Image (tube, rainbow, N blue to C red):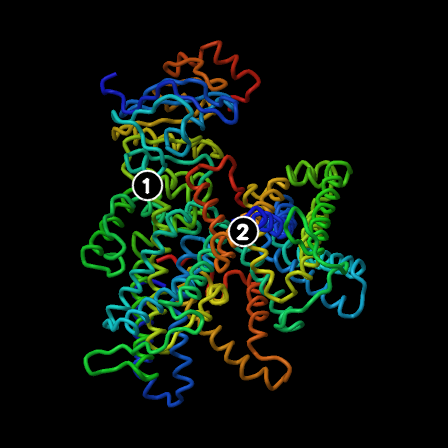
Amino acid sequence: MGAPERRVVLSAVAVLVAGAPLAVESRYLLAMLVFIALNGLPAVGLSLVMGFAGQVSLGQAAFFAVGAYVSGVLTATHGWNGWLALLLGVAAAAALAVVVGLPIFRLSGLLLAMATLAFGIIVYYVLVNWSAVTGGPSGLAGVPPLTLGRFRFDTDARMFWLAWGSLLGVLALTGNLVDSRIGRALRAVHGNEAAAAAVGIDTARLKLGVFVLAAAITALAGGLYAHYLTFINPSPFGFGYSVELLVMVVLGGAASLWGAVLGAATVVLLVEALRAVLPLLTAAHGAAEYEIALFGLLLMAFMLFRPSGLAGLAPRAS
Amino acid sequence: MTAEQIAQYLISGAVVGGIYALIALGFVIAFGITRIVNFAQGEFVMLGALAMATLSARGVRAPVAFACSVVSVAAFGALLYRGALQPLTRAPALAVLILTIGASITIRGVALILWGTDPLAVPAFAAGPPVLVAGAVMVRQGFWVLGVAAASFVALWWFFTRTYSGAAVQACAVNPLAARLMGIRVDRVGVLAWLLAAGLGAAAGAVISPITYATYDMGLMLGLKGFVAAVLGGLVSPPAAIAGGFLLGVVESLAAGLVSSAYKDAVAFVVLVLVCLAQVLGALPWRVVEEG
Amino acid sequence: MTAPPLLEVRQLGRDFGGLAAVGSVDFTVAPGRIKALIGPNGAGKTTILNMVAGALPPSRGHIVFDGRALPGSAHAVASRGVARTFQLVRPFGDMTVLETVLVGCHLRGRAGWLRSALRTPAQRREERGLRDRALEIVGAVGLEDRAGANVTSLPYGEQRLVEVARALATAPRLLLLDEPGAGLDAAEQHRLAALVCRVRASGVAILLVDHHIDFVLDVADDVVVLCHGERLAEGRPETIRRDPAVMAAYLGEDAA
């Protein structure tokens, strides 16, 4: 969508976001909406990487974890200011993305995917084994909520505003980026890399830039997550979460920012629906066991029948 | 650090290496002929192991159970290719990659539903106490692992170099268009390739299961490591993949013994990172083949 | 020769696995002149072009542009003022003509990630400027009524014009044209030839590679004939046309 349409949509959603916690009574529903936003952010990031750099990253969970743990450890263990810690988590993830991305983005598609997978798993291992800092498998408790003076972001409603506010902010900024000269260059690289290089576009640097941006956005979500739950442990940050993000983006259609949010919402709702419905159908298995198969089937189904996702695969023209 | 300890690491490394070599060979055959990197290769290993466990639990004798496991998983692999992947020959590489990721996850998810989370024990192929080899202890199953691996490599070598069908398969790998013009049914050869790849994976899983148990999530790691071994040969060289597998197994074992066992799994990834760096710096004497 | 050569190629060579696609070739290109590289298939013309464009590293020899050695990557070469077109047109997915040429204007913009994300007034001004410039160029190649069309929906001849427009958008001093006449009918070739002459008139140096003799002889100032990776002859088009050695090299070729 073009800039003016985007402004309209963003404003409309902002109004909804402002009013929603006042209208929605159920804490359960509010919490689910918070999770949609907190998943929407990394989904948008991955959507940028897949849609514009044209690469699959199977290690985004690692950046989410870095954001969560850096912010969590700095506040819980060292008493830092929440916002500063959050910012540092984002910076740490960005720096990590540069270090990892520089060699990786010169690789071909498949090797790059495998390398991101390996990177994600290595980070997971570090989180599990570096118990002195991260608390190991049992995790880290006591992460304080974010505060603004006397105002504490410690309720579902307040975190809802913060999470959705961040998501809308990121959507506005990345939307502007997509329409700009940089966004055009990205679409050009995606369209035909050799031709893009022939007009002076540094394709490797651009792809790296997208990767770093995605890492930063993902880490922001991770940090918010930590201050929301006040407790973090490594288990939600493994390869499984990277796959979930992939499913969200595939569902929503790569290179569509709103599609990514749609995909995130769909996955979150689907998982909740599974948990609600399955115990009624079968007593034998927990819903979690069916999630994996369901995600796999969704990926396959979309690739076979609807590769453009729910919103369209081609990068949006301005 | 005694000579016996080193021998121990080498021996156990070689056994694990045999598994990696089998898996790596599966990657190379599937990629060489269909130009698809099978993200689900590790799941074929897992299915082989679980099938072996289930059949043994029902009292089926080891050789029969092994044969049944390998054949059924091989057939499944061929079907997967024929049904889901071959139709997408002209799709962009990204889509095919995601499709194989989806396949791998689906297989794992279904295995979880069917078999649950508890690791299943599998009896060794032949009963008997561990054996002393060059001062190191090796469980008897280790001989079976190396035997299956060796037999598979020899059989495949013979097939590719001494039979007409094997030559046809090689032709398809080198130049599908020319092969088609010569009357070779290229699509059938693709199915055969996946049949072989899945069979190799299943054999690896079935023969290692008495040592490592069989669980629904054993495929991811094994598949990754097999992939790293295959990449060492540029994804196209069977001998390099086999050598890579054994090398990875030994290095992993030595690292676990000499450095720390907690980061044992990290070795494969470090190797992968090094290979990637080497490719980027142009230090590799070959190029890891890129798709299409 | 009034102006010093902008491009100097000395003893340039390139091997592919033991086979010398280009043995040792020397030539220069001056501003405001069109130099054509012709020769039968396999003569090494496109290889030379790719080396000058920075897409392929030479095995030996030197390429000197504006007195300095050329950098080793395609995008760095482009930022020095060397633009190129491709033998088979390479559109950017389903971008429009205007967007494609806008991408060509990439180097003229300064706004980075932050300013673009924030849409600062300076960035918006720059965007407007880029857009105006792109429209100018689209007009200069004669496609103003196609500006909003998807490039892939245009006839091939017009797609080729978009390619040239995209290259011109980088404000190059040297323009490399890789078989620009390929796939074009006579009318389209004529239109293209006229455009190329206009570009020459603006002072741009042009290196043109083709194996269609007629198109080249219409347009070129100097011709270098290559055969099996070596220079066979060099001179004005009229001379080359009558050279028996050149005809022999082309014997059996359809001099279309």
Q: CA distance from mark 1 to mark 2?
A: 44 Å
Q: Chain of mark 1?
A: A
Contact, CB < 8 Å: mark 1 with mark 2?
no
At which x and y percent is residue B164? 77, 38
- Find numbered disc 2 in the image and state the secondary structure of the residue it sits on: helix
Q: Chain of mark 2?
A: B
The amino acid on which the numbered mark 2 sits, given as a three-letter code, is: Glu
Residue A185 visible in the displayed image: yes
* Above or below for C165 versus A274: above
Residue linked to disc 1: A200
The residue at the far front in this view is B2
Question: Could you say which quadrant of the image residue C235 lies in?
Answer: top left
At which x and y percent is residue C72? 35, 33
Task: Name the quarter where the C terminus of chain B is drawn.
Answer: top right
* Above or below for A251 versus C14: below
Residue drawn at point x = 51 percent, y = 38 percent:
B287
For this rendering, which residue is in front, A259 or B63?
B63
Q: Is there one chain holding both mark 1 and mark 2?
A: no
At which x and y percent is residue C250? 52, 17
The residue at the far bottom in this view is A25
Residue B90 visible in the displayed image: no
Judged by depth in the image, the label closer to the viewer, 1 or 2, is: 2
- Find numbered disc 1 in the image and state the secondary structure of the residue it sits on: loop
Say whether residue A37 is left or right of residue B98. Answer: left
Q: Which mark is residue A59?
A: none
Say whether residue A260 is left or right of residue C139. Answer: right
At which x and y percent is residue C21? 49, 23
Residue drawn at point x = 39 percent, y = 40 percent:
C163
Residue linked to disc 2: B252
Question: Could you say which quadrant of the image residue C119 lies in?
Answer: bottom left
The amino acid on which the numbered mark 1 sits, given as a three-letter code, is: Gly
